[in-house]
Amino acid sequence: MAGFKNKSKGESGNYSEGAIVVHPTSIVAPGAVLDQGVVIGPYCTIGEHVRLGVGTRLISHVVIEGHTTLGANNTIYPFTTIGMAPQDLKYQGEPARTIIGSGNTIRESVTIHRGTQGGGMETVLGDHNLLMAYCHVAHDCRIGSRVIMANSANLAGHITIEDGAIIGGLSGIHQFVRIGRLAMVGGMSGVPKDVPPFVWASGNRAFLYGLNHEGLRRNRIGPEAISLLKKAYHILFRSGLSMSEAAGRVRGSLPMTPEIEHLLSFVESSERGVLTPPRDQGDHVPDGSSP
């Protein structure tokens, strides 16, 4: 590759001979560990406690610092920073970690901050996620796998996002909020409470607007399971019962499929409380399309 150079194994033993490509304008600290097939493009900076997994590619102008580990076959686009100190005044320089899995695509100008003492010392991102340009993942967040964050979606600290969720562009998620599996958060939403699995949430102060039917179909959730989820949704969120009463009614009237079990477990374990539908609207998303 023109302008690049292969790094042979040096005194530190960090480089596999002939397997790593580093542009001469990039800075790789002596303690960094680069696995086979890593490609580091122009003007990148890699800190001494960083490990990049097999086949990971940094396009250019990427900064990775702190105690940070990336798995295999990630692609990181320009002006992204990973593992930098959190924007938390309580942070005192503790050696917190950033752990990123494999197969992720992280686009331009994304920021992912390391964990803190008050949040388990780890920020974690799973596998096969897509973080579009300008997204922010704050300290101590835990993101599962196959999550999509659209442009400029922002996560405050201590947020959990379960597998397969989608966060719309320009959305802001409050600290300590959980986003459930296969949930959809519409663009430009403000989310102050937990979003249950399998639902659609949207709005300046977000409300629930029924099931995320398209997401369920795309993830091969069958029609019978979707029908049961719809019944559970109406009992939990539109019956007027308290959450404990509604959960009991779901258990007493519906089969306990894996999806129903997960939904109940999520809402019953919520500490911030869960979003609810708006009082004056049916189960229709704000743009008028059916959920």
Image (cartoon, rainbow, N blue to C red):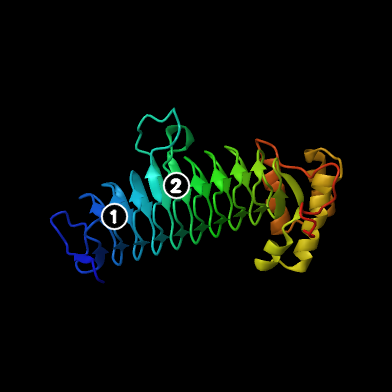
Amino acid type of disc 2?
A: Thr
Disc 2 designates what residue?
A: 111
Disc 1 designates what residue?
A: 43
In-image side of 153 versus 16 (left or right): right
The crowding category of the residue bearing disc 1, from other C-alpha atoms within 10 Å (few below 14, some 14 to 19, many at least 20), is some
Residues tagged 1 and 2 counted as in contact (Cβ below 8 A): no
- Picture residue at 44% right of the left edge, 46% below the top: 112
Residue closest to the eye, 57 or 276: 57
User: Please, what secondary structure does the residue beneath circle 1 have?
Assistant: loop
First in sequence: mark 1 or mark 2? Answer: 1
Amino acid type of disc 1?
A: Tyr
Residue closest to the eye, 51 or 45: 45
Q: CA distance from mark 1 to mark 2?
A: 17 Å
- Picture residue at 73% right of the left edge, 59% below the top: 257
Q: In which quadrant will I find the N terminus?
A: bottom left
Where residue 79 sits in the image (x, y, percent)?
A: 39, 52
What label sits on residue 235 in the rendered view?
none
